[in-house]
Amino acid sequence: MRAVQHQFVWVLCVFGLSASWAAAASPDLSTPKKAATAFALALQKGDFDTIRAVTTGQDADYKLIQPIAAMTSAANRLHDACVAKFGEDGKKIALSTGDPQDIPRQIEASEEKITGDSASIITRGTTEANAVKLTKVGGDWKVDLAHYPQKEQLAQVAQTAEPTAKLFSQAASDVTSGKYHSATEASQDIQQRIMALQMAMLQSRQRPATTPSR
């Protein structure tokens, strides 16, 4: 599952974060760093409603984020199903988790620049080009998706997110229903399905466009 895990983690790497499955119950948008934290947690949880509440953007921006949030939510379900079914062995099947406290710690350690109603968050080891932009709306700071860093790469991830989310969801259902007798069997089957999906998507991208007949 390493390639799919890379897709998932890349979406969050602008914050320098590792994967985690917790989210704030009530987003605090009182400062740029707290708003960035609320966004990162919501994205990791796959909570699209909260993502909309803590961001600003156009319809096109949310069309990029929504399938990624769905993929993350499905990854969470697969992770939880594997751990519930196979215990510690289940953690080896699904995406790895991290300490939820890493998110606020890492963002708090980032550089924050505020100019009027605009702000940027730059994590350690990254450049201004990777800064997360925020804007103040009323009394709340919100992540500005219109200026989200590396949107071309984000669009590439979004293209594969929907089929990946479906695969994760089906795999979670299969694990829960008792389809697999062991964590090893589950791991082998899920990895084979992921490889098949990746191959199909690669072939689809490489297939030349056909010219409509007249």
Image (spheres, rainbow, N blue to C red):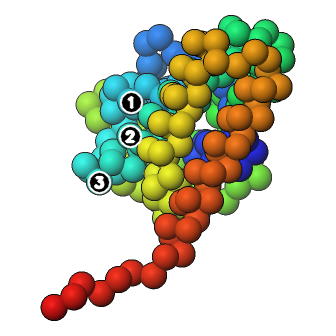
Residue tagged by mark 2? 66
CB atoms at circles 1 and 2 under 8 Å apart? Answer: yes
Q: Is residue 108 above or below residue 203?
A: above
Of circles 3 and 2, the one toward us is 2
Residue sitting at 47 percent across and 45 percent down?
Answer: 163
Residue sitting at 59 percent across and 13 percent down?
Answer: 176
Q: Please provide percent x and percent y for residue 146.
A: 36, 54
Q: What element does badge 3 sit on?
A: helix
**Cα distance between the residues tagged 1 and 2:** 6 Å
Please rate how many residues cluster around mark 3, counting C-alpha atoms within 10 Å: few if below 14, some from 14 to 19, many from 20: few
Please tell me which residue lies in front, 116 or 15.
15
Image quarter of the N terminus: top right
**Whether residue 206 can be seen here:** yes
Q: Given the image, on which type of amino acid does mark 2 rest?
A: Gln
Q: Is residue 213 above or below residue 1?
A: below
Residue tagged by mark 1? 48
Q: In this view, does 81 lie above or below 43?
A: above
Horizontal arrangement in the rendering, residue 89 relative to residue 171 (left or right)? right
Q: Is residue 11 above or below residue 174?
A: below
